[in-house]
């Protein structure tokens, strides 16, 4: 039995081969996020181009992939004899992505008489990167599909996906936050936002000070000597927009100093266009998998 994991670009997978791209709507044109699928009238746009244009003032809005685009990617694998497990962004983050994946899966199930499993991952961004890594490891372990699905539905409850918000100006510029929020930047307030129960939740109180000092406070609040043993050392995802004031090497040195995670995991990855469209430098996402449930599983 062959199994493939598909995703959409809100989940920011490391490997884009099995990814269904979201649509990035600019002022005058619409684009595929990072990767072209099938519509000849829409070109793919890179996260770098989106970021630069957003930084220059262009407003971008993101839309979930079309049902046809989901079907295009899924059907390619079905016709090659694969069982498809699709990881969808949280309903609380992108309801259209989840609903579109379900609609495509149901249609293809009727056409091919074969079940396509869609999982609401309850996460997005860096959290999507890490659950996709975990899912692909399960596939490489040659586990049966039902067991893979069960493990994914369990692990999604134990993913810590968190974001460092250095500035809110891009959120205001893109219409994602009110103009009054610019006061936060004036007072040098930096924020941590976590994904809990599939929705974004700001952590209080904010960090005050420079972008770099706030980032290191954020990083040490997420993972440190006191709590590192509660996370699985085999999984870590560190995602960034363009960095200007953050020293990412200092962050990597700190993570390495914990002597806990495999050094191969401690490297930065780019956010795709859905996050880059905010046009804000020095945004960072960090995702980990909480370990306690894995230990419990071993004894069942």
Image (spheres, rainbow, N blue to C red):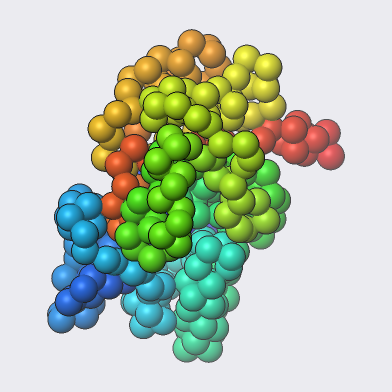
Residue sitting at 15 percent across and 80 percent down?
40
182 relative position to 116: left or right: left
Task: Give the residue at the far right of this rendering.
Answer: 300
79 relative position to 132: left or right: left
Residue sitting at 17 percent across and 55 percent down?
56
From the top left corner, tell me how far across and down residue 163 is, in percent: 49, 42
Q: Nearer the viewer, residue 208 or 78?
A: 208
Number of numbered markers: 0
Query: Above or below — where is 45 with respect to 98?
Result: above
Residue sitting at 17 percent across and 77 percent down?
28
Q: Quadrant of the C terminus?
A: top right
Query: Can residue 133 be seen at all in this image of the molecule?
Result: no
From the top left corner, tell me how far across and down residue 205 is, in percent: 62, 36
Q: Nearer the viewer, residue 272 or 291?
A: 272
Residue sitting at 34 percent across and 37 percent down?
282
Q: Nearer the viewer, residue 269 or 111?
A: 269
Query: Can residue 230 be seen at all in this image of the molecule?
Result: yes
From the top left corner, tell me how far across and down residue 179 is, in percent: 41, 60
From the top left corner, tell me how far across and down residue 127 is, in percent: 52, 47
């Amino acid at each position: 039995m062959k199994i493939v994991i598909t995703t959409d670009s809100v989940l920011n997978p490391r490997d884009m081969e099995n990814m269904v791209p979201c649509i990035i709507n600019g002022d005058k044109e619409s684009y595929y996020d990072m990767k072209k699928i099938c519509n000849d009238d829409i070109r793919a746009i890179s996260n770098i181009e989106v970021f630069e244009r957003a930084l220059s003032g262009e407003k971008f809005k993101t839309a979930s992939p079309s049902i046809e685009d989901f079907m295009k990617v899924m059907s390619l694998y079905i016709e090659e004899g694969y069982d498809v497990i699709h990881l969808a962004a949280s309903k609380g983050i992108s309801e259209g992505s989840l609903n579109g994946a379900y609609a495509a899966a149901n249609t293809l199930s009727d056409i091919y008489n074969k079940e396509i499993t869609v999982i609401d991952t309850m996460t997005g961004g860096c959290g999507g990167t890490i659950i996709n890594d975990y899912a692909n490891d399960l596939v490489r372990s040659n586990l049966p599909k039902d067991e893979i699905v069960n493990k994914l539905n369990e692990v999604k409850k134990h993913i810590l996906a968190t974001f460092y918000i250095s500035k809110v100006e891009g959120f205001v510029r893109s219409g994602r936050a009110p103009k009054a929020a610019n006061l936060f930047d004036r007072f040098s307030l930096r924020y941590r936002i976590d994904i809990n129960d599939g929705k974004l939740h700001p952590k209080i109180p904010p960090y005050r000070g420079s972008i770099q000092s706030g980032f290191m406070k954020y990083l040490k609040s997420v993972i440190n000597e006191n709590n590192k043993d509660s996370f699985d050392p085999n999984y870590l995802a560190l995602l960034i927009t363009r960095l200007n004031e953050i020293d990412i090497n200092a962050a990597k040195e700190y993570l390495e100093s914990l002597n806990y995670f495999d050094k191969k995991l401690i490297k930065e990855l780019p956010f795709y266009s859905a996050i880059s469209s905010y046009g804000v430098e020095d945004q960072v996402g960090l995702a980990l998998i909480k370990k306690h449930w894995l230990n419990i599983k071993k004894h069942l």
